[in-house]
Amino acid sequence: MPSDTIDFDKRKQILTLGTIGLYSAASTGLYFAWYKQYDQEAFHFFNDWGEWNNMDKAGHSYATYTQVLLLHKGAQWAGYENQKALNMSVLGALIFQNTFEIMDGFSRGWGFSLGDFTANIFGASSFYFQQKYWGEQKVKFKFSYAPVEYSSELLSSESGLFSTSPKARAEALYGKNPLERLLKDYNGQTYWLSFDIRSIIDKEIWPSWMNLAIGYGSENIYGANNNSWEINDERTVISEAKYPRYKKFVLALDYNLGKIRTKNKFSRTILDLLDVLKWPAPAIEYRTNNTWHFSLLFLH
């Protein structure tokens, strides 16, 4: 179809209304589903750097980067010129993400986290500067997840009056249903930077569909700073010897789905959406409990 027959004004209206509608639904829904349940107070800051092994910070960077990417594709589809599409997508993603940071700032149990805000800026900036100066994303943010099977071994509190298990603790922290686990279970998540080696070295010897990715994850995370907690003044501690809390750094092959050729626009869209995820591939993993592991198909 010739480009002069495309109604870009209509596309811009669809993009604007869709973005505003999605933002309104997400922010309103989250407020009533989550923030309204907790006490509110005057706006304040909260330093949560280091909690959860900073897995949440990696998640913020990934989420903001991905939102910029999707908004940018939408702005291009709607016919905005390159710089305006880039500016709009970055601004839209930062407004979306930082709305939740502001809500945190009024919540008594949390606060506005400068660490989260910085992670949001990092994710958005990573997309912006690559697109502005390279015209492409040579380093992509990606995400992988696999469900964790938690132990049902009973653990006694320090007084011996209360017992729980790693599984029960994980359900209390991360939820029970698959969607909650996907979004919240740090033990099953890995965040990645995927490097387009072919584009970086500009040599045909490297396959265009293959990237190298560096991943970051954690295991045996049962608390923000350590694996101990209190319920009704009863303190429970998960044994560090039996359930060591550690970080992991992974080097893996990755698939560059954006380089798979297709003339079908729907197939192209699906491949682009799937490319925000890191799919199983051979990997070598270093854990901070000083162990190494190789996986033929790394899951998390």
Image (cartoon, grey):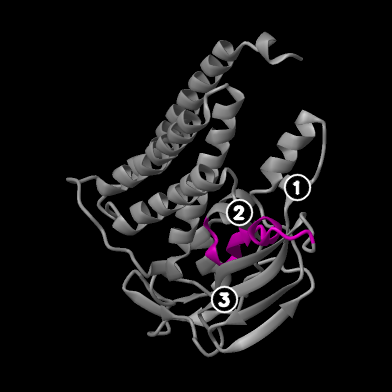
Tell me the residue at 76%/29% (across/down).
265
Dot 3, crowdedness within 10 Å: few (<14), some or many (≥20)?
some
User: Can residue 221 be found in the magenta stretch?
Assistant: no
Residue 47 image position (x, y, % from top left):
27, 63
Q: Is residue 272 visible?
A: yes
Picture coordinates of residue 174, whole percent (x, y): 52, 59
Q: Nearer the viewer, mark 1 or mark 3?
A: 1
Give the residue furthest to the left: 42
Give me the C-alpha separation between circle 1 and circle 3. 29 Å
Magenta stretch, residue numbers: 184-204
Q: Quadrant of the N terminus?
A: top right
What whole-number distance in Å separates the C-alpha atoms at marks 2 and 1?
12 Å
Residue at image position (54%, 56%) is 175
Please check the rendered image and state whether residue 193 is part of the magenta-colored stretch, yes or no.
yes
Residue where numbered disc 3 is placed: 248
Circle on res. 7:
none
- The picture quadrant where one finds residue 36 is top left
Please tell me which residue is depicted at 54% across the width and 35% down the height of the picture: 72
* Residue placed under numbered mark 2 in the picture: 138
Q: Quadrant of the C terminus?
A: bottom right
> Where is mark 1, residue-wise?
259
User: Which structural element holds mark 1?
Assistant: helix
